[in-house]
Image: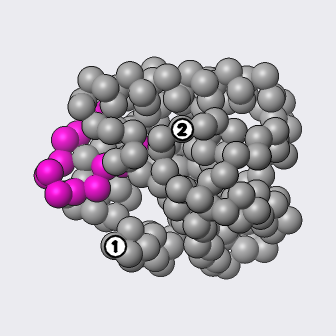
Amino acid sequence: MEYLYQAGKSNGKKFILLHGTGGDETSLVELAKILDADSTILSLRGAVKEEGMNRFFKRNGLNQFDFESLERETDHLYEVIKQLSQEKAIALDEWTLVGYSNGANIAAHLLLERETALTKGIFFHPMSLEVHTQSFDLADKSVWVSYGGGQDPIVSEASFMTLVSAFRERQANIIVAKTNHGHQITMDEVQNAREWLKG
């Protein structure tokens, strides 16, 4: 898996960046530096191609997910994260997963469906992937999620709230931020997530 690593200051946050469809390992770097200018960044490129666009798992059309690909790529992503964390001597619980759209979806799926020492996530415009096979407690997880409102052509409110409920029902600490600006990330969202990180 292609990736970009930038070491930050010792007191900075540590971010794993997961882009949206069509993005790459550079897409969220500027956003990460707004979240924390001193941050260490591990930014990963999705290994799946859809009409030339990078993704983290396959789909068969808009919101029609390939679940075999989802599970396979989630395992692959987690193995890459563990390997690179070991190489960089960074404990898994020091990372914050930062994902947008497709990247947010696989990151949320990882926390919900894999028992992992990863504990924190910032997910811009995620949705439920309708996979609920696990029931282990998520009280050690802290998640910030945002939704673009009725103007979002990809994420419905019902799907977004199903995801929120999945975390809440398993005792995760979750903060929800809503906008009315559709599927694009806004500066207000980024600033909101930045303040959450300081808490």
Question: What amino acid type should be assigned to the residue bearing mark 1?
Answer: Lys
- The colour scheme applied to this rendered structure is one colour
**Number of residue marks:** 2
- Residue under the image location 56 percent in, 21 percent down: 76
Give the percent coordinates (x, y) of residue 68.
78, 22
In this picture, is 194 found above or below 33?
A: below
Residue type at mark 2? Thr
Give residue 101's position: percent from left, percent from top: 62, 50
Indicate left or right for 26 with 38 as reference.
Answer: right
> Residue drawn 54% across and 56% down?
141
**What whole-number distance in Å separates the C-alpha atoms at marks 2 and 1?**
23 Å
**Residue on which the image places disc 1:** 198
Q: Quadrant of the N terminus?
A: top left
Q: How crowded is mark 1: few (under 14 residues within 10 Å), some or many (20 or more)?
A: few
| Vertical comparison of 62 with 166: above or below | above
**Residue 63: % across, % down:** 82, 44
Q: Do the residues labelled 2 and 1 touch (CB within 8 Å)?
A: no
Of mark 2 and mark 1, the one earlier in the sequence is: 2
Question: Viewed as shown, does residue 31 lie left or right of 59?
Answer: left
Q: Which residue is drawn at 69% across and 39% down?
A: 113
Above or below, 107 against 70 in this view is below
Q: Can residue 23 be seen in this view?
A: no
Asked if the magenta segment contains residue 10, the reply would be yes
2 or 1: mark nearer the eye:
2
Q: Residue 116 carries which label?
A: 2
For the record, the magenta segment spans: 4-17
